[in-house]
Image: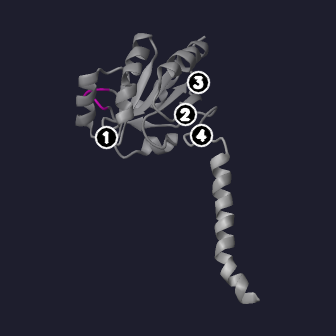
């Protein structure tokens, strides 16, 4: 009798695992929503060398006193290329933008920005990815809205869309700028 249960054990395990998989597939979860741990907290303290020769370092003091959009980007990132025109638009709307060139060769980033246009007021070079770790990014592109006091008010872990600009970022920047 006991031997029969040994033969049924693999089938029982398969049924149990199938149940777990079916449960996971039926849940309405967004796999890109992995949370935003900095939301509502002070933005990390950073001090990055400038991307451009002769430029100023990018530090956390740079986003104090004025609402700032901080974007992590890289020239090798295809979604960054897609969202880039939206940052040019934000610049034309008077939004203060700082860029963090993430794990990218400076000469490649400079060439990329030279071709596409540079919307950033200041760009820090994060070649080792330390600022990315401090901000808790999972990849590029990722965008943060930081208020006048240095508090993270929005974190988007994906490429921006026109709807993000129109319905979320511009209204938030306007509200926080009051």
For label 3, the residue is: 149
- Point out the tag, 1 or 2, that comes first from the N-terminus: 2
How much space separates mark 2 and mark 3, taking CA atoms? 9 Å
- Point out the tag, 3 or 4, that comes first from the N-terminus: 4
| 41 lies above or below 5 | above
Rendering coords of residue 116 (x, y %): 28, 23
* Label 1 crowd bin: few (<14), some (14–19), many (20+), radius 10 Å: some
For label 1, the residue is: 104
For label 4, the residue is: 30
Q: Quadrant of the C terminus?
A: top right
Q: Residue at x 45, y 18 (%)?
A: 96
How much space separates mark 1 and mark 3, taking CA atoms? 29 Å
Q: Quadrant of the N terminus?
A: bottom right
Q: Quadrant of residue 9?
A: bottom right
101 to the left or right of 168: left
Q: Nearer the viewer, residue 156 or 133?
A: 156
Q: Under tag 1, what secondary structure?
A: loop
What are the residue bounds of the magenta stretch? 51-55
């Amino acid at each position: 009798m006991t031997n029969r249960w040994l033969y049924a054990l693999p089938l029982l395990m398969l049924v149990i695992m199938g149940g777990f998989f079916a449960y996971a597939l039926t849940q309405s979860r967004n796999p890109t929503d992995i949370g935003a741990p900095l939301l509502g907290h002070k933005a990390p303290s950073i001090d990055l060398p400038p991307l451009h020769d002769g430029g100023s370092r990018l530090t956390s003091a740079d986003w104090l006193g004025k609402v700032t959009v901080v974007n992590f980007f890289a020239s090798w990132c295809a979604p960054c290329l897609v969202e880039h025109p939206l940052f040019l638009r934000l610049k034309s709307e008077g939004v203060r933008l700082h860029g963090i060139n993430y794990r990218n060769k400076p000469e490649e980033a400079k060439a990329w920005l030279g071709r596409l246009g540079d919307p950033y007021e200041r760009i820090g070079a994060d070649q080792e990815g330390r600022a990315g770790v401090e901000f808790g990014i999972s990849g590029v592109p990722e965008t943060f809205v930081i208020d006048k006091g240095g508090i993270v008010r929005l974190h988007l872990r994906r490429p921006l869309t026109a709807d993000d600009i129109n319905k979320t970022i511009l209204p938030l920047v306007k509200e926080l700028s009051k």
